[in-house]
Amino acid sequence: MSTKKTISIQQARKLVLLSQNLPSIKTTGRAEDRTLKAVEQLGYVQIDTISVIERAHHHTLWNRNPQYTPDHLNQLIADKKVFEYWSHAAAYLPMRDYRFSLIRKSAFKNNELKHWYNPDSKLKNFVLKRIADEGPLMAKDFEHNGKKIKDWGSKPAKQALEHLFMQGDLMISKRVNFHKVYDITHRVLPDNLNTTIPTKQEYYRFLILQFLSANGLGLPSEIGYLLKNTKTHISNTIEEMCTNNELIKLAVGSQTYFALPDSLNLLSKSLAKSRLKILSPFDNLLIQRKRMQNIFDFNYQIECYTTAAKRKYGYFSLPILWDGQLVARMDCKAERSIAKLHITKTERLIKSVGNLIA
């Protein structure tokens, strides 16, 4: 049976940051390979359309790989090493983990999960046949002269495409000007990929192992974040893995977390504390706000979805990582045409930042 070990909050933060590869360390090899390694280590990279500074997926990967360029993702998709699907939100995922996306896809196909669009079986069959016969297509390739549906202003063919995508009949083969290009799934997948649907137990073990590898330590609620009907199963699997010494318990203050047995070896490694990082609001480190409050004492909320009158820190405030802590935030906007970053507001959270952002 796993015994409980105690670590300080500073050690917990270090464990989380090293697992997240923040700040990034110098590595060798092709820049594109380092980008793939970052996606595989994180488990997913969230896709977001907001580009006040840069789209979230590019920003997140650049913070793990300073040699990152946006064409890396395009090439990794073309090489069938990364694919688009759903994590807790739309995301790029490692192709090696493809089979674990089949649980959600199967749930949509069997109506165990409800899609945000109402299904139209006739239209779905029409869309699927056109792509099968003609090759990859975008939503704009399906003419529609009627009124748009109220939900997100999408035309019916777009809704059918998203249904087929979520249930696994279609995949995104590439994007053109950020517009999705859909193709039949078997034409997007690499040869000899394992496409067997995992058992529920395999799936829960995967969720646990992937989260703890990417995040250092975690709670059942964090591992099952936004995944419906998983919390009890994850908790039971964690207890079983602790009994088998596959996981350890870590006491951080009054909270007990779970971690991989080898994770504490990371604490012997150095953390590049002097390397400042400006993070995307959708960075993997930050996406669970309650977790950031508990571990980093950082109360963060992106305010682009709130009215201007209710904003405290600005439309798109970015957290700043320095000295192993989240020390500040700044509201800013990129003016790409003249390569200028406008900083409209900053907030310093700890005194040790000094004049860093003054």
Image (tube, rainbow, N blue to C red):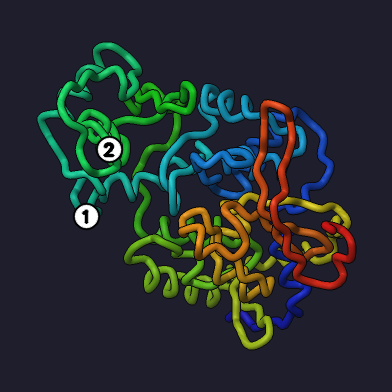
Image quadrant in which the N terminus is located: bottom right
Location of residue 30 by image quarter: top right
Residue designated by label 2: 153
Image quadrant in which the C terminus is located: bottom right
Q: In this orientation, which residue lies closer to the viewer: 338 or 276? A: 338
Q: In this orientation, which residue lies closer to the viewer: 64 or 234? A: 64
* Distance (Cα) linking label 2 and label 1: 25 Å
Q: Position of residue 315 (x, y in %)?
A: 57, 53
Residue beneath the point at 29% across and 42% down: 152
Q: How many marks?
A: 2
Residue beneath the point at 44% across and 50% down: 89
Single out the residue that lies furthest toward the left: 122
Tell me if mark 2 has few (under 14), some (14-19) or many (20+) residues whose alpha carbon lies within 10 angstroms of its own: few
Identify residue type, mark 2. Gly
Identify residue type, mark 1. Glu
What SS does tag 2 mark? helix
Q: Position of residue 138 (x, y in %)?
A: 34, 22
Residue 14 in view (yes/no): no
Single out the residue that lies furthest toward the top: 134
Q: In this orientation, which residue lies closer to the viewer: 283 or 74? A: 283
